[in-house]
Image: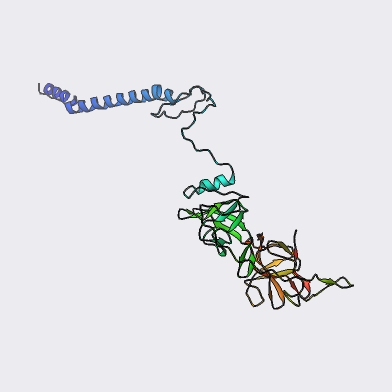
């Protein structure tokens, strides 16, 4: 009897407790969930991203849909005109005028004749108020426009060549650049050769004294030119140039000085063949004839543009350094 009771009690101890049964149930459920997730990955997600043709995994699509191509419609060449469109300038003069649209309208062009409308105007070496002044013209002085206008610092500048006028050194010609207008007033005005009635006439300039007659140079039997004594500049060769002429350097080189005479400082050196315009009457200094000139622009070996302005001697040592250039 006692033995049977112990056997029944041993069977009761072999059965799992309730907590163990719950743990086993949870583990089984988790195992089943993992199997389901693996099945979904293998049989649903992986086949979706694998291309059947190449076996390559395609890029994961983004949220931005791929736009479909629309058929291209050829545009017609007929454009609607813009109301109030400004015509595009074509010539150099029109372009410069457009650049200087803030100043008074330009009234001059290349080949025109103009006169000074202000009491005095400065003639400068190059366009721009910061360049050196090479001459001053009084009201009524006539000039020819020789170059295209340039807009510099809000001003329209013209290259000019004045008509001969009298100065303290005799007849001269001004060559350089002048601004057409300044501070809302015209400095130059178109002219037909006479001062218009709208502007006061310029005071007449005194006529320059005529140069003394010059005896032509004599030629020796050997063909050399000998010095002829002249009233204008005794002891030198007769002058062959006059104001307004163009001359050429025939010596190896000549010096351009700040004034007539070797005592003045040397400003430039011009080589053989360089051209220049005679802008002033000749002066006899120390037995030599000096001319005020303005050289034609040229580019030096350093790449700098040179415009020589000053005085040169026509002859030295019985030889001409300059010759007239037709």
Compared to 37, does 155 lie above or below?
below
Residue 232 drawn at (x, y percent): 72, 74
Q: Residue at x 75, y 60 (%)?
A: 325
Residue 37 drawn at (x, y percent): 34, 25
Q: Is residue 4 left or right of residue 52?
A: left
Q: Residue at x 87, y 73 (%)?
A: 220
Q: Residue furthest left?
A: 1
Q: Residue at x 14, y 22 (%)?
A: 8
Front residue of this view, candidates 248 and 47: 248
Compared to 198, does 253 lie above or below?
below
Front residue of this view, candidates 67 and 233: 233
Task: Specify the quadrant of the image occupied by residue 217.
Answer: bottom right
The quarter of the picture where the N terminus appears is top left
Q: Is residue 159 left or right of residue 216?
A: left
Q: Residue furthest right?
A: 221
Front residue of this view, candidates 177 and 67: 177
Residue 122 drawn at (x, y percent): 54, 62
Compared to 168, does 82 lie above or below?
above
Residue 293 drawn at (x, y percent): 66, 65
Q: Residue at x 45, y 30 (%)?
A: 59
The quarter of the picture where the C terminus appears is bottom right
Q: Is residue 47 visible?
A: yes
């Amino acid at each position: 009897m006692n033995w049977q009771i112990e056997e029944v009690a041993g069977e009761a101890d072999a059965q799992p407790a309730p907590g163990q049964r719950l743990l086993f149930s949870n583990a089984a459920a988790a195992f089943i969930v993992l199997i389901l997730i693996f099945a979904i990955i293998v049989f649903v997600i992986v086949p979706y991203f694998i291309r059947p043709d190449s076996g390559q995994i395609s890029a994961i699509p983004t949220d931005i849909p791929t736009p479909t191509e629309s058929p291209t419609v050829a545009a017609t060449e007929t454009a609607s005109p813009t109301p109030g469109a400004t015509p595009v300038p074509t010539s150099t003069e029109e372009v410069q005028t457009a650049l200087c649209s803030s100043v008074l309208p330009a009234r001059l062009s290349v080949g025109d004749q103009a006169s000074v409308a202000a009491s005095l105007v400065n003639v400068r070496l190059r366009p721009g108020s910061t360049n050196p002044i090479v001459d001053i013209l009084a009201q009524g002085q006539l000039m020819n426009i020789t170059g295209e206008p340039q807009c510099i610092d809000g001003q329209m500048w013209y290259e000019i060549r004045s008509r001969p006028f009298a100065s303290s050194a005799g007849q001269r010609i001004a060559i350089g650049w002048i601004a057409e207008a300044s501070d809302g007033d015209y400095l130059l005005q178109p002219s037909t050769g006479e001062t218009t009635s709208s502007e006061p006439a310029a005071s007449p300039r005194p006529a320059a004294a005529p140069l003394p007659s010059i005896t032509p140079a004599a030629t020796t039997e050997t063909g050399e030119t000998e010095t002829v004594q002249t009233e204008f500049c005794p002891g030198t060769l007769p002058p062959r140039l006059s104001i307004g002429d163009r001359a050429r350097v025939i010596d190896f080189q000549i010096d351009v000085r700040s004034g007539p005479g070797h005592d003045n400082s040397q400003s430039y050196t011009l080589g053989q063949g360089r051209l220049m315009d005679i802008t002033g009457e000749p002066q006899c200094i120390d037995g030599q004839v000096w001319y005020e000139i303005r050289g034609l622009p040229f580019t030096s070996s350093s790449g700098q543009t040179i415009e020589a302005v000053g005085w040169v001697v026509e002859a030295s040592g019985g030889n001409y350094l300059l010759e007239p250039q037709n």
